[in-house]
């Protein structure tokens, strides 16, 4: 075919062609990126509480067996605070989908989530657990009151009506009925939800019972500041923070048979051959005493779902519904067999409906 007489495109036309090609390329790249972001991950990612960890692992394993079209979720630990911090980093495939917590999310954490774009959070309470105090299985028995733990671990206590640096070096100094063991208390680190419950229900309660809070307020502190001071622990090595999970606490007791550790009830019930549990306020911890509210140091357990990830991360809603189902979280399910104190039937039904309807906090 002859091209004689055909005119070459002008510079203006060439620029228009190049511009159109560039815009099309950018648009295609943007669509590809969007598709990649939405499908960058086909596996649910969970992190948080070491107390909730074994329950979530049981559910994840059973979920993988039950739903062949979904991969088993990846479940990691790190503590409630650390998990919620990850959860609140934003929305997208590079962020976790679920945060496990052995305490309720704080208002400050909800605010941090919202500022990062995580505005729709589904709160799921799935059962209860107790916090227990245990020593080596071959060691002496203890009958604790919150006051004993405060007098053992507080930086300052009241002696002869005055607030002084804690002079107690042994458990016998704390309570004449206890053995003369050097105080060595292995307590959850500050990133763990168990630590916060321990501070509130044991240390603060013991501070008030010992008269120390009253002395602080009499000395000029307001009640809020006094309450915060009551939750502090001494820094001379008597109180040892455990940043890992309960297996680390157990290992510490193995190396120091006169140490006392703080554990979740379910962990203790799965290690009764290694641990001897103490009473608290005259009550032995058990599924029954936690369920009835008789045992004083217990708490609800939660997980939090990022609603924006439902429908994007495959199987996320199905995993949540499976977790709170009667099959898993009911009285005859594997979570109760491990040590979970199940929710009462009416409360369990409310939670199941909230998950089904994707009800977010504040709705």
Image (tube, rainbow, N blue to C red):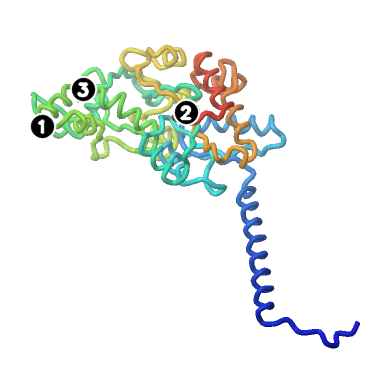
Residue assigned mark 1: 220
Give me the C-alpha separation between circle 2 and circle 3: 37 Å
Q: In this view, does 65 lie above or below 337?
A: below
**Residue 6 in which image quadrant:** bottom right
Question: Depth check: 211 or 343 in front?
Answer: 343
Give me the C-alpha separation between circle 2 and circle 1: 42 Å
Please identify, in this view, whether the residue under mark 2 or under mark 1 is nearer the observer: 2
x then y, percent, for residue 336: 54, 20
Q: Are the residues tagged 2 and 3 within 8 Å (C-beta)?
A: no
Q: In this view, does 256 lie to the left or right of 68?
A: left
Residue assigned mark 2: 363
Q: Which of marks 1 and 3 is nearer the N terminus?
A: 3
Mark on residue 332? none
Q: Earlier in the sequence, mark 2 or mark 3?
A: 3
Disc 3 crowd rating (10 Å Cα; few below 14, some 14-19, many 20+) is: some
Q: In this view, does 300 lie to the left or right of 211?
A: right
Question: Depth check: 91 or 285 in front?
Answer: 91
Disc 1 crowd rating (10 Å Cα; few below 14, some 14-19, many 20+) is: few
Mark on residue 208? 3
Q: In this view, does 103 lie above or below 76?
A: above
Please identify, in this view, whether the residue under mark 1 or under mark 3 is nearer the observer: 1
Question: Depth check: 185 or 207 in front?
Answer: 207
Give me the C-alpha separation between circle 1 and circle 3: 16 Å
Q: In this view, does 223 lie to the left or right of 98?
A: left
């Amino acid at each position: 075919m002859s091209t004689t007489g055909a005119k070459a495109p002008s510079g203006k036309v060439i620029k228009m062609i190049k511009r159109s090609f560039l815009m099309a390329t950018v648009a295609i790249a943007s669509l590809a990126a969007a598709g990649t972001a939405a499908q960058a991950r086909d596996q649910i990612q969970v992190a948080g509480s070491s107390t909730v960890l074994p329950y979530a692992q049981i559910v994840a394993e059973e979920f993988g067996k039950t739903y062949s079209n979904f991969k088993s979720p990846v479940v990691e630990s790190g503590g409630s605070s650390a998990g919620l911090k990850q959860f609140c980093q934003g929305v997208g495939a590079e962020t976790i989908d679920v945060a496990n917590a052995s305490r309720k999310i704080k208002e400050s954490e909800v605010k941090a989530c919202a500022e990062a774009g995580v505005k729709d959070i589904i709160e799921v309470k799935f059962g209860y657990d107790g916090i227990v105090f245990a020593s080596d299985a071959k060691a002496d028995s203890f009958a604790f009151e919150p006051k004993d733990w405060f007098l053992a671990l507080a930086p300052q206590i009241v002696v002869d009506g005055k607030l002084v640096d804690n002079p107690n070096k042994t458990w016998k100094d704390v309570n004449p009925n206890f053995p003369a063991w050097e105080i060595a208390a292995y307590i959850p680190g500050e990133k763990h939800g168990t630590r916060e419950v321990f501070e509130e229900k044991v240390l603060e309660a013991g501070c008030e019972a010992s008269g120390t809070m009253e002395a602080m307020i009499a000395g000029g502190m307001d009640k809020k500041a006094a309450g915060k001071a009551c939750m502090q622990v001494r820094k001379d090595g008597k109180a040892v923070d455990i940043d890992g999970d309960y297996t680390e606490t157990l290992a510490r007791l193995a190396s120091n048979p006169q140490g006392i550790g703080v554990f979740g009830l379910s962990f203790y019930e799965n290690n009764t051959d290694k641990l001897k549990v103490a009473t608290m306020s005259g009550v032995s911890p058990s599924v029954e005493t936690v369920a009835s509210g008789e045992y004083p140091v217990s708490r609800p357990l939660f997980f939090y779902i990022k609603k924006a990830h439902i429908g994007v991360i495959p199987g996320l809603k199905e995993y949540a519904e499976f977790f709170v189902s009667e099959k898993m979280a009911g009285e005859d399910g594997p979570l109760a067999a491990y040590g979970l104190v199940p929710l009462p039937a009416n409360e369990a039904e409310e939670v199941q409906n909230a998950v089904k309807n994707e009800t977010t906090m504040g709705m």
